[in-house]
Structure formats: structure tokens, C-alpha cells
Amino acid sequence: MGNRLSKIYTRTGDDGTTGLGDGTRIAKDSARVSAYGTVDEANSAIGLLLAAVLPADVGALLTTIQHQLFDLGGELCIPGHAAIFDADITALEQALDRYNTPLPPLKDFILPGGGEAAARCHVARTVVRRAERETVTLARHDVVRPQAVHYLNRLSDLLFVLARVLARASGHGEVLWNHARRKS
């Protein structure tokens, strides 16, 4: 492992810049810092989800995803670095298929909810969607490997499916949007 942090504050960021993994300094409000910062936030949201009662297989999958999100943050923090690969995306797609196949087809929109774990999963999903948007924004200004965007896109889909699974497993069920509640 690289350098160990023996001192947490350095004061080098007091000027509004931060150091990238390659040593260059950039503004803390840059598109790159926003992208990898939101990936970190998504990882934290998944950590909060992992603090809920979950089926063991879902917990194991989410722990693997946390490691991959940390890798993705590193990829976005070090220009030119590759840490997320096609195999990672394929693994997400396989998990999506495995968890989605037994679910009934969607006939209505689902509102975030369905018990504590499902609600936390929905929060994680929306943070991953924001990370995806911010990574797309970064890609308009700088080189970003397409695998980064693809991974985030699949992950948000997987979290949606897992929220459905968790809502059903909790006994709360899915919260369906009642579009007929308002009459014009």
C-alpha cells in the first residue's frame, strides 16, 4: 500500500484546491472532484444500506460493490488510470438478471419506500444516478473511460431491482405511485 496518513489535516486545501492521485492540484469544485466525490457519497450510502438488516447474498454483493466504487473513485481521481473493467459491468448485469427474473413485471411506477432497507437502497440508487450525471459532465471536459459511466448506469439499475427485492423481503411491499389520485 502507498503512503499512510499519519496526519489528517495538511492545510494544503485551504486555498480551495485538492491533490489528485497523480499529484496535480485542481479546484475542489471542478467536475473531476465532483464526480469522484459523488462516487464516494454513493459508497457511503451503500454503507448505510449495509447497516440495515439484509439477506446475506445482498450484503455480500453490496460489499463487493463498495470495493468497486472505491476503485472507480480512484480511476476518476487519477487521470488515465483504469480500475473498472468490462467484467465488472458484466457481473452487475448478471446480478441484475438474477434478482430481477423472479420479480413480477412492473405495471406502475414505484415510490421510494417499502421498509427501511428498501428506502436506504433507493437513496443509494439516486446518489449513484447523480454520480453518473457528474461523471458524464466530466467526460464532456476531460477523458473518462466509458466503463466508468456504464458501471454507474448498471449499478443504479441494480439498486432499483434490489430495492424491489428488499421491499418484498421485508413484508412491506413496494409503494406504488397512485397516478389516479388526482382528478383534473
Image: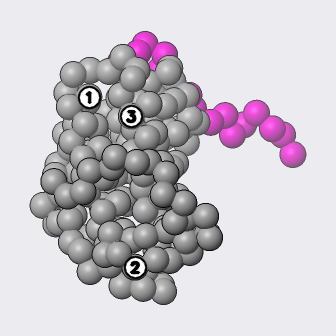
List the residue tagged with mark 3.
Answer: 47
Identify the magenta region.
Answer: 168-184
Quarter of image, res 149: bottom left
Q: Where residue 182 sits in the image (x, y, percent)?
A: 81, 38
List the residue tagged with mark 1.
Answer: 59
Whether residue 76 appears in this view of the structure is no
- The amino acid marked with disc number 2 is Thr
Whether residue 83 appears in this view of the structure is yes
Q: Nearer the viewer, mark 1 or mark 2?
A: 2
> Disc number at residue 152?
none
List the residue tagged with mark 2.
Answer: 24
Quarter of image, res 167: top left
Q: Nearer the viewer, residue 27 or 139?
A: 27
Q: Where residue 19 sits in the image (x, y, percent)?
A: 43, 70
- The amino acid marked with disc number 1 is Gly
Q: Residue at x 44, y 31 (%)?
A: 48
